[in-house]
Every structure is written in C-alpha cells, then in structure tokens.
Image (cartoon, rainbow, N blue to C red):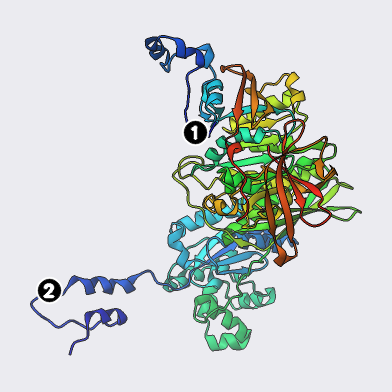
Amino acid sequence: MSADGQRRNAPPPSAARTDPRLEQLLAHPALWRAGSAARGAVWPSGFAPLDAGLPGGGWPRSGLIEILPMRFGQGELQLLLPALASITRRPEARWCIWVAPPLQPFAPALAAAGVALSRLLIVRAPMRGRRPTSLWAFEQALGSGACDCVFAWTRHAPARHIRRLHLAAQRGNTLGVLFRTREAAGEASPAMLRVALEPRGDGARVTLLKSRGGARGALDLIWAAAAHVPQRMP
Amino acid sequence: MRVPKTLDLFAPQAPERPPRRAVPPPVQPVQMRKTPARPSQAPLWLAVHLPQRAQAADPVAPRALHSLAVRAQRFTPRISLAPPDAVLLEVRSSLHLFGGVDGLRRTMAGECAALGLPAILTFAPTASAALAGARAGRAFTVLEAGQLAGSLATLPLAALCWSPELIERLARIGVRTVGAALRLPRAGFAQRFGAARLAELDRLTGRAAEPRERFEAPQRFRRRRELSCESDSHALLAATLRSLLEELSRFLAARQCGVLALECRLWHRQAAPTRCVLRLGTPLADAARLAALFDERLRMLTLPEPVRACELRAGWPVPQPMHTGGLWQPGERGGLATAPGVELIERLRARLGPEALETLALVADRRPEAAWRAGPPASASAPAPDAGAQAAVCPARRPLWLLPAPRPLRQRRGLPRWRGALHLEGEPERIETGWWDGGEVARDYYNARDGRGRRLWLFREREPPHRWFLHGVYG
C-alpha cells in the first residue's frame, strides 16, 4: 500500500456494520466503548489496512509500543518509515532518536523515503561493565519531552523496565518503539501495543499480538518502495 | 548674520540671548537647552568596608575581597580593591539602573549578606572620602562635592589609616578629626607632617585627582574548595561542586558568557588528583544544569582515596547568545528551539561520551560509503529541511541499513552465498567512481534475498577476482 493513509481515528471495523444513526450516536465524545478505549492522539502509520486495525487509527503519540521482527533488519524500519517521514517533516518536529541501532542507518535511503535527517539523532550505547547503557539512554530520551519518537533496539528488556519506559514515554509525550526479536513474543509485556513482523514477499505479515482497544490478528502489507525498479547509471 | 538655533546646544554655559522680538521663540531650542542640566557625571564612589576583615588579621581576607569584587562587577566595571578591608566602586552611571542610591545600597548589602560579610556602605564623590567614611563606620551618602567637607569634618583621624605616631602627634596639637586637619595651614602641615600626607588630604576632598588601580577579574575561572573532612561520599562531593558551580555561574553571568569545557579535580592525600572533564555542545552557564551533568560523571568515577579538596577549572568563556523567550512552547507551532532537546543531548553526552551521539547528513557522492557523513549534533534548532537535494543524489533504491564495512561472501560457481544460497533479483546497478580521491570503486550492486526472506544489497567487484560482498540490508 502506498503511504497515503492520513486518516485519523478510523472507526473500529465492527462499527461499519451498524446502523448509521446508531453510529452517529456512538460517536459522541462523552461515550466510551470498550473497543475504542485506547483512542488517543495518533500518528497515521501510512498503511491504510494497518491504521484500520490499530487502536485509534495509527501509532500512539505517547506511550511505548513493541515491534517484534523475526530478526533485526527484517522490515521493522519499513513499517515505521511512512510515519517517521511525516513526523520529522512537520515544521514543529522534535527530535527523533535512535538508540543503539544494530547497523549503520543509511542516510540516502532515509532521505529518499522523506525522512528529515536534521531531526534524526543516533545514539550509540556503549557497554558499561556487562550492562548496556541503551535502556538508560532510551528512558532519558523518552522522558525528556524533547523527542517525537524514540526507537531502541535491544534483546533483553525485563517487564519491569518496560513499564518504566512506558511511563517515561507518557511523561515525555513521546512515541517509544522498542524493537525486540521474536523470542520476546512469549514474555509478558506492559507495552501498549505489540506487533510481530515476518517478511512475506515484497512486504511483511503484521500480527497484532496485543493492542488495547484495537483489532487482533494478522494482515499482509506491501512496502511502498518495493515497486521501485533499480535504475542503471546513465 | 545669526547663528542657527541648533548650535545653542554646544554653548550651554552662556547661551546666546535670542534677540527680542514679538513672535515667541520656538519651543525646540528651549527643550534642547535642558539637556546639559542632567545629573552631573562627576564620579561617585561607593566604598564597601568589611569591618570584620579589618580587625582580625585574616588570611582569607584577600579572597573575600576578591569574591566581593567579582560579585560587584554586575554594578559597574570600575572597581578598585582597597586592601585589606574594602572595595571601591564608581557607580555614578549605574545609579539609574539600580534604583538610585537607595536601591543600589540595598542590592549591594544583599550581595554582601549572601557572602556572609557584614559591610558598611558609604557614598562619596571621592574614593578616599568614601573609604574614610566607611572605615569610620559612617554609612553616609554625599552626592555632590560641595557637601563633602561637612561630612568629612567629624571623622576621626584614625579613619585615614595613618600611622599611630602621626595621629598621636596631631592629637598633641589638638587635631583629632579630619575637619581639624583640613583647617590647618597647608604649607605648615606639609612641612611638619610631609607633603605626602597633604596630598592624601587633597585627594580626600577632591582637590587632587586620585588615580586608582582598576580591578581586573581573571579571565578563566579557577576555584578550589577544601572539604570539611576527607570523604568519598557522593552527596558531599556533589554539594561542594554545586557551590563551586554556582560561583562559576555568577562569574559567567557577569561576562554574558558560557563555557564549553570544565574540569573538576578531586585532590587526595597521596594519590594523584582524580580528573573529571566535562565537554559541552553549546556554551552553558546554568549552575543547576552543569551540576546535573557533573552528577552523571561523578557517579561513574572510581576514587583511589577519599577526597580532601575539590577544584573547578573552567575553559575560556565563550560569548553566549542571549535567548529570547518564545511565545510558543517547544513542540507547538513555531516553538522550534527545544530547550529540553539541548538538555537531553548534554545529559546523554555526559554519560555516554561525546562520540556516542551523531547526526546524519548527505554528501553528493555515488559511493554508498561516502554518500553520508556522521557529525555531532549542532544544536536543537533545526536547520532547513534538506529533503530537496536527495533526488539527484539517490535515484535508485537503497537499503535502509548499511554494514559498517562490506563483508566478503563465500561463493559457489560464481554466485554468492551467505547462510545459504542467495537469490539475485532485478538488474544490477553499476557504481564506478571515485578515481580522483584514491577511494576508487568499480562495483555492480545487486538486490538479493536470502533463505529467510531477508532482502540484502550485494556487490560484485568488477576487477578480476570478482569477489562478492554484502553491503546493506533492506530492513
């Protein structure tokens, strides 16, 4: 799907089948329904089918989510790229910080996808003793209020740390994205949203493992840039 | 011929009388003639006398005077030390900034109180008179030279800090006050007590000019503080450092500067001092933020021995641009200069090291390894969005991840393998450039997919060994 999803607060799928008058009544802001309990401010993900399934119709603007690819570098960045581009290109954009990325982010590809590089900050987290400093840097960035979104790649993140990170993200009004490998899917996690990801053709199969007030289940996405045919040098 | 009216300004003392005529004179020259009637610009000295320092032969006295002079720099640049017990400030042009004599007296007394030094403040048109008045304990205020003699008349001679023998000799002829000394015949006084004493009296009344040595504050901050006891407690060290940083902050505020580098040395009994260096991205003068940054560094230190003293050395002061308060909060429309952003960057840098943070920038080069550049984050204010320049640089598809260095791949029958066979997709992209700077590359880049569905970016060298390398990962 192309990155055209600018909808916000898409109605939950179940609401589409009901009477329009009833729907109008239920859209009253004073009404809270179980299916839309987590409706808050969101960033559109850029993938319309995914927006329809996510609570509130996009990635939350504040709070911690987890994305669990099979291995690092299997589409987890593609999944967030349209949202990242629209977040960083706003005139009032705050920082977007990447903590301990597994490889070198390739600036020309990010720029070609529309990401404003001037808003991007890479933090290398060296090991201190046997403990990596990445979770500390992640929490600092989340809680500072200086970032729109903070990405972190880590393999070990105990649940109590994730709760702390989630609170920090809410304090800083920041979208925190924790990338973990698929082995972590079995562990309990207090993150708002858990998305598993596996490569499938020119896209990926996205499974919502946990989404407060959103849909569950799997859907297939196709990366927008996959249709791009490589060109020869002139 | 008549002189134009505007020239009246230059002859304020004896303005030419306008010729009598029926029409009333224009208003403007009258207003201009008022200009010279501003408060006189004759100097006005404020003497700050510290009575405690005069009584006790205190070895700390020079330091107390020094720190008082540093603090007083916010009132005036013309400061002179009068050791051992006083500081002199020329404040005539500062009066209107600090609410007149009363306001200045209050503010200065507050500064002295903050240093824990009770002081006597005296205003007088000459430095010596202010000093003598303050040393005599008279906190008088004399603004005009004409009223000076009256205030000086009752001062005891001891206020002049003359030698006891001289004061005794004067007392024997019945001269016990400054006023009495001033009434003596000048020639006889000079003959009996020396011309130098007469010159002192002349400087006291303003009859002779009194050049004073100007206090020059040191350009770089360096302060050492002994701990009350040897300790390795983090709380005590942090508190000591914090008070040093507050002094630094005042030092920098007087110069409207910030620092980029700071060093804290912790002195031990035996071992070499432990050094803790802080480097900053932007000039900073805020004590609280510096203390928070040092706190991060102190937590990581391992001390060989308990600490006896703490010394703070600052680098050269860097002019700090004054910030204009924004109407918008950071994150709102227009609220770009994100102060929390700067703070966050400083904190991360303090803990992780200066090279741990980098921003990416594009370079117009076809070689993937040269097409980007990592640099330190400049500041939180955003440069112009640079999305326009990319299309020309990067027409083809590129992976999101690049390996730090191309990784050689094994091959079988001319085809690359990496954890199993790789399937090449699409047509290759040839990159052959860079012959001019020694980093020549001649490669054919392929997209490939491994057995797990991961898409990779490989290249094959065009030179004879035709080796294969993995260079990027689409992620």
Q: Total label count?
A: 2
Q: Is residue A61 left or right of residue A179?
A: left
- Say which quarter of the image contains residue A21: top left
Where does the image place residue B55, in percent across and percent down from the top left?
Answer: 69, 61
- Say which quarter of the image contains residue A224: top right
Q: Residue at x 63, y 51 (%)?
A: A232
Q: Which residue is mark 1?
A: A4
Q: Which residue is mark 2?
A: B24
Q: Choose between B81 and A34: the one closer to the eye.
A: A34
Tell me the element at label 1.
loop
Which chain does the residue under circle 1 lie in? A
> For the residue carrying disc 1, how many other residues have a C-alpha within 10 Å: few (<14), some (14-19), or many (20+)?
few
Instruction: State the residue lying farthest toward the right.
Output: B270
Q: Is residue A35 left or right of residue B213?
A: left
Q: Residue at x 71, y 45 (%)?
A: B446
Q: Residue at x 82, y 39 (%)?
A: B417
